[in-house]
Amino acid sequence: MPDVHALLGGDADALGAALWAERLAYDSGELGCEDYWGAVARSVAVEELSEQEVAELQDADNRYFLTLDPRSRELIHDLARNDVRMALLSNASVAFGQAVRRADWFEAFSFAVISGEERAVKPDREIFEVLLQALSHETGGVSIPSAVIFFDDKQENVDAARALGIDAHLWPRNGEQGDQAERHGTEIAREVLAARGVPLD
């Protein structure tokens, strides 16, 4: 939000409301990059954006969502070092999907399922089925939902995954929006993974 506001100016509250009001349409692939940022810009009376301005806004958005908590990065490294297969399932735009695959930490992941590319969003059953189908290609076409350990910061997404038999767990939000008294998501994840026999040493 601060970086986007620095680029567009105007009323910060109106800008923040527009960022989230249009987000579901953007993450579901209904809105393209230019249309999404155009709608956000109009909320602060910026009527037209150049191609470069759209790219700068998307870059600012990507930087925020690609920033990893240090403890999360450490967990990813521990899993990768032990050859644990990881996949990313994200409600995100097509533009973010392109950016995340270039992130330094993404090399630890086998693949990503991005809602904007699939035109389905969590907690819809369809996007979890896409994930399971992609995983089944790595196991000879056999889909075993209970073999998938899934973490998400929204209970509705956890519940949707569990409804398909996936071993799903809530990862509390960390950082500025989180409750500082709440346990960090990596603590919960490490306990769950250790209990399932996943190597972390």
Image (tube, grey):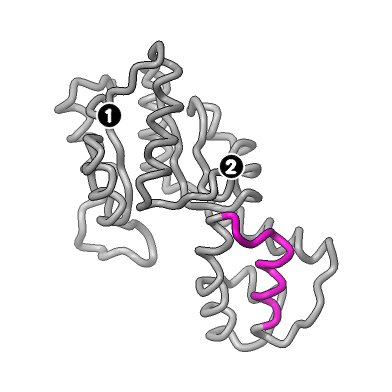
Q: Secondary structure at mark 2?
A: helix
Which residue has dot 1 on it? 145
User: Earlier along the polypeptide chain: callout 2 or callout 1?
Assistant: 2
Quadrant containing the N terminus in the rendered view: bottom right
Quarter holding residue 10? bottom right
The span picked out in magenta is 29-42
The residue drawn where x is 42% and y is 48% is 69
Residue 57 in percent (x, y) is at 70, 64
- Establish if 148 lies above or below 48: above
Q: Is residue 115 left or right of residue 11?
A: left
Judge by depth and name the residue closer to the eye, 200 or 129: 129
Q: Amino acid at mark 2?
A: Val
- Establish if 110 lies above or below 126: above
Examine the structure image and report whether residue 2 is included in the region drawn in magenta: no
Callout 1 crowding tier (Cα within 10 Å): few <14, some 14–19, many ≥20 = many
Q: What is the spatial separation of the Cα atoms under label 2 and label 1, in whole angstroms?
A: 25 Å
Q: Secondary structure at mark 1?
A: helix
Judge by depth and name the residue closer to the eye, 192 or 135: 135
Q: Amino acid at mark 1?
A: Pro
Which residue has dot 2 on it? 100
Quarter holding residue 44? bottom right
Which residue lies most toward the top here?
140
The residue drawn where x is 53% and y is 56% is 28
The residue drawn where x is 44% and y is 31% is 87
Callout 2 crowding tier (Cα within 10 Å): few <14, some 14–19, many ≥20 = many
Quarter holding residue 25? bottom right
